[in-house]
Amino acid sequence: MNKKLAAALSGSAAIALTLTGCSDDSGAKADEWAKQVCDQVQPQVKKIQEANTSINDASKEKNSSEDVKKTDAAAFEKISGAYKSLGDAVDEAGPPPVDNGEQLHSDAVKELRGISAKYGQLRKTVDGLDTKDQAKFAEGLQGIATQLDTLGKSGDKALSKLQSGDVGKAMANQKGCKRPGNPPSV
């Protein structure tokens, strides 16, 4: 059952990586803004990937339900903190220097903080699972996997918009926003 949880988490890493760009050069103001955000991105993506890996590893090993519960709770806490930090980085950078920058900024911060809150809630849900009843525990994990799948597919429109145009081009040029060559599979 925890394998479904790990598979669902792969969507969360994809959301974090939507902050990475994929275009060419841009103006100086956009570059400056992108650098401020991107300097904070890579460490947070790494935290999310590490948390996903811990859940994946726990699902492969023959861990007790209590160990799986602790691993998952800690991972969700780490992911929640990473998304909060990403939201803070975008918020502190302020609106990007583009048309509709205020709206792009507001939407991205709201989405990142919302994702953080949802992972915080998942942690509380995991903490409340009964590990003494294997069937109920598995059912609880199934419910969490469903929530993760929904979260992974949740609207990353604001982030996609944020990484488009001149700002996206500027972000693509920043070391912290470059996609890793081969991210670990979860």
Image (cartoon, helix red, strand yellow):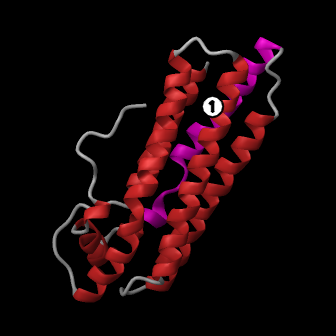
The location of residue 120, given as percent across then percent down, is 69, 50
Examine the rendered structure and indicate whether residue 130 appears above or below residue 102. Answer: above
Residue that appears at 77% across and 12% down: 134
Q: Nearer the viewer, residue 44 or 116?
A: 44
The location of residue 69, given as percent across then percent down, is 70, 28
Q: Nearer the viewer, residue 124 or 154?
A: 124
Q: Is residue 131 left or right of residue 148?
A: right
Q: Nearer the viewer, residue 172 or 49?
A: 49
The location of residue 111, given as percent across then percent down, is 57, 63
| Residue on which the image places disc 1 | 71
Check residue 144 for magenta coloring. yes
Q: Is residue 145 left or right of residue 153?
A: right
Check residue 143 for magenta coloring. yes
Asked which quadrant contains residue 88, the reply is bottom right
Residue that appears at 62% across and 43% down: 76
Examine the rendered structure and indicate whether residue 81 appears above or below residue 38. Answer: above
Residue that appears at 67% across and 23% down: 67
The location of residue 142, given as percent across then percent down, is 67, 25
Q: Is residue 128 left or right of residue 43?
A: right
Residue 86 visible to an observer of this rendering = yes
Look at the magenta stretch and give its main secondary structure: helix
Q: Is residue 98 left or right of residue 58?
A: left
Asked which quadrant contains residue 164, the reply is bottom left
> Which quarter of the rendering shows the C terminus?
top left
**Element at label 1:** helix
Crowding around mark 1 (Cα neighbors within 10 Å: few <14, some 14 to 19, many 20+) is many
Q: Which residues are magenta?
A: 133-159
> Which quarter of the rendering shows the N terminus?
top right
Three-letter code, disc 1 = Thr
